Image (cartoon, rainbow, N blue to C red):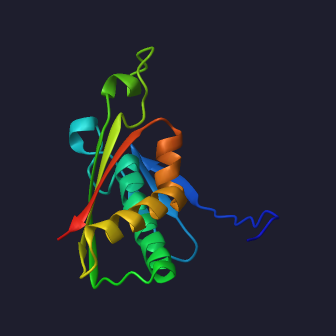
């Protein structure tokens, strides 16, 4: 185990485009347009920021599953994610005492595997301990309910 910090810096760039739309650049990848749905005043030309947080949860967990499955000799042929977050729009409107971030997140993970549910649970426990995005949500006091099962 490493005893000294091993820091990794990540960076993005963003530019307001119009209305509620922002263009985001990450490394050398194609520009991502972030927008809000028409129901919230946007033009619906891209995902909104909190949808990207949920996407980040799936992709971060996917990376951690691959790394930790290798450590645990856990075998799977496919894994899919379905996430849902609940926001109280009063927080975005500035109502005192109402958090603007997710109130709760449901995080469903479906494996195609021959492993037992007990082995899936052991993998889940380690991923939940080490996944940066999941821990960011949990440390913000968001109830993250994870359901990990065979598909």
Q: How many marks?
A: 0
- Residue at 32 percent across and 57 percent down: it is 46
| Residue at (42% x, 72% y) in the render | 65
Of 32 and 87, which appears nearest the observer? 87
Residue positioned 33% across, 38% down in the render: 104
Would you say 81 lies left or right of 49 here? Answer: left
Q: In this picture, is 138 found above or below 107?
A: above
Q: Quadrant of residue 96?
A: top left
Q: Residue furthest left?
A: 151
Is 4 positioned to the left or the right of 90 in the image? right
Q: Residue 39: x percent and y percent?
A: 21, 38
| Residue 30 appears in the rendering | no
Residue 72, x across and y down, in percent: 47, 78
Where on the picture, by quarter, is residue 130? bottom right
Q: Is residue 33 left or right of residue 11?
A: left
Q: Is residue 135 left or right of residue 145?
A: right
Residue nearest the observer in this picture, 75 or 25:
75
Quarter that holds the N terminus? bottom right
Determine the residue positioned at 41% across, 58% down: 57
Given residues 2 and 83, the one toward you in this image is 2
Find residue 6 and report its horizontal and vertical position in percent: 76, 67
Q: Is residue 16 above or below residue 32?
A: above
User: In the depicted view, which residue is nearer to us: 112 or 33?
Assistant: 112
């Amino acid at each position: 185990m490493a005893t000294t910090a091993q820091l990794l810096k990540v960076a993005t760039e963003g530019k307001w485009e119009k209305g509620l739309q922002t263009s985001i650049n990450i490394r050398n990848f194609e520009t991502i347009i972030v927008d809000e749905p028409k129901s919230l005043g946007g033009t619906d030309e891209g995902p909104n920021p909190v949808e990207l947080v949920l996407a980040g949860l799936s992709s971060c967990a996917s990376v951690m599953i691959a790394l930790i499955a290798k450590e645990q000799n856990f075998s799977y042929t496919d894994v899919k994610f379905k996430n849902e977050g609940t926001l109280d729009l009063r927080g975005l409107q500035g109502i005192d005492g109402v958090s603007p971030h997710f109130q709760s997140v449901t995080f469903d993970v479906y494996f195609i595997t021959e492993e037992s549910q007990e082995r899936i649970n052991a993998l889940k426990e380690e991923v939940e301990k080490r996944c940066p995005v999941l821990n960011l949500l949990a440390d913000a006091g968001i109830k993250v309910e994870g359901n990990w099962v065979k598909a």
